[in-house]
Amino acid sequence: MKRCILMLAAAAVLFAAMGALAYSGSVVQIPEKASALELVILISLSLGIMSFLFGMITSDYSWVDRLWSTAPVLFAWIYALKADFSPIVLLPVIVVSLWGARLTFNFARRGGYSGMEDYRWPILRKRIGNEWLWQLFNLLFICGFQIGLFILFTSPLAPLSRMSAAVSGSVSDLFTAIPPAGYAALAAMLFFIGLETVADQQQWDFHKAKALSKAAKTPVAGKTTGAGKPREEDAQWLAAYPWKDDISQGFLSSGLFSIIRHPNYLGELGVWWSLYLFSAAVQATLFHWSISGAVLLSVLFVGSTAFTEGITASKYPEYERFQASTPALIPLNLKGGSSAAREDS
């Protein structure tokens, strides 16, 4: 309760300051005069300040995590609005919205909007050790770099938003302004969203099975069943769960995860690289400054993979074998490396 009051107080102060500026006339004209990219940058600065303040006040540093699925969608629709909803921009924006809906749903059902902090932040905070250095990391990386990434990986829409104003003709002419390579890139975005959706569900089912299995084995009043016993329908679901070996080893290495260790990461990178390729195809150029978003996102995921897997390997002895047999992101062994590893053991 105290955390919520402090959070609301910080929001009230920030919004009061922004309201005072608006009343003074200094920002009232910005939405009309600014380009879509300038608006996105202005909103990002506000989100960064809010996330930093909320993190300091609540000691919960997952505020930016809660923006991952929403802020990029907002930015995308700003580009669409500034382009008068031209199909050149509107089509990829709709696909980005599907991406956001999937991620929002998955994050919500995992409790991400109900105060659950990313488990990695407390670990990293402990490793840093110094509170001032941690707050500097919060400011520069968690709030600054990550929200900056939102700007960059949606930035391929910026040149499209400007281009659409210069493209004249009927709606059909605007659709034909998108080359076949552009439609292929949109199809790739949809494929990678589908990949993420399947991976999300497999991971969700695994953690559900893991929790139910643990509950069934938890001693209650000297018994192996009782308050911890799953409901009948849950017990039936658990009995039908196909990957029970994964439960005993502690991590998921079946399904899509038998092909690559991080299908979610591959899907995420695929979405934003495909958006860049769509923009490049429409502009008829292979290289554009907006490629920086996909590049930096890839760098972030490489670092995140190393950090996350270090934590996982310290908890589960078999994880190193999984790492050795199954590639992280690129599906080099479509037969499933982890299954082969289990056969060798």
Image: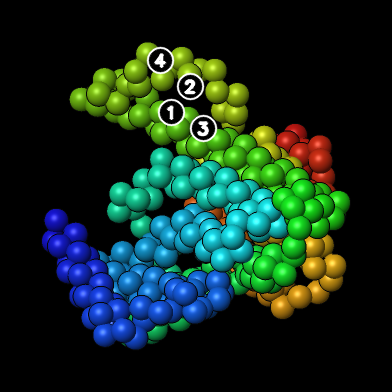
**Disc assigned to residue 205:** 3
Q: Which residue is mark 1?
A: 213
The residue shown at (67%, 68%) is 165
Q: Secondary structure at mark 3?
A: helix
Percent across and percent down for residue 43 are 43, 72
Q: Are marks 1 and 2 in contact (CB under 8 Å)?
A: yes
Say if 193 sits above or below 238 in the image: below
Q: Mark 3 Cα within 10 Å, few/some/many (few <14, many 20+)?
A: some
Between disc 3 and disc 4, whose residue precedes? Answer: 3
Three-letter code, disc 4? Glu
Three-letter code, disc 2? Leu
Between disc 4 and disc 2, whose residue precedes? Answer: 4
Three-letter code, disc 3? Asp
Q: Are marks 1 and 4 in contact (CB under 8 Å)?
A: no
The residue shown at (43%, 28%) is 213
How far apart, in angstroms, are the residues tagged by discs 1 and 4?
13 Å
How far apart, in angstroms, are the residues tagged by discs 4 and 2?
9 Å
Q: Secondary structure at mark 1?
A: helix
Going by the image, does 160 lie left or right of 199? right
Between disc 3 and disc 2, whose residue precedes? Answer: 3
Q: Nearer the viewer, mark 1 or mark 2?
A: 2
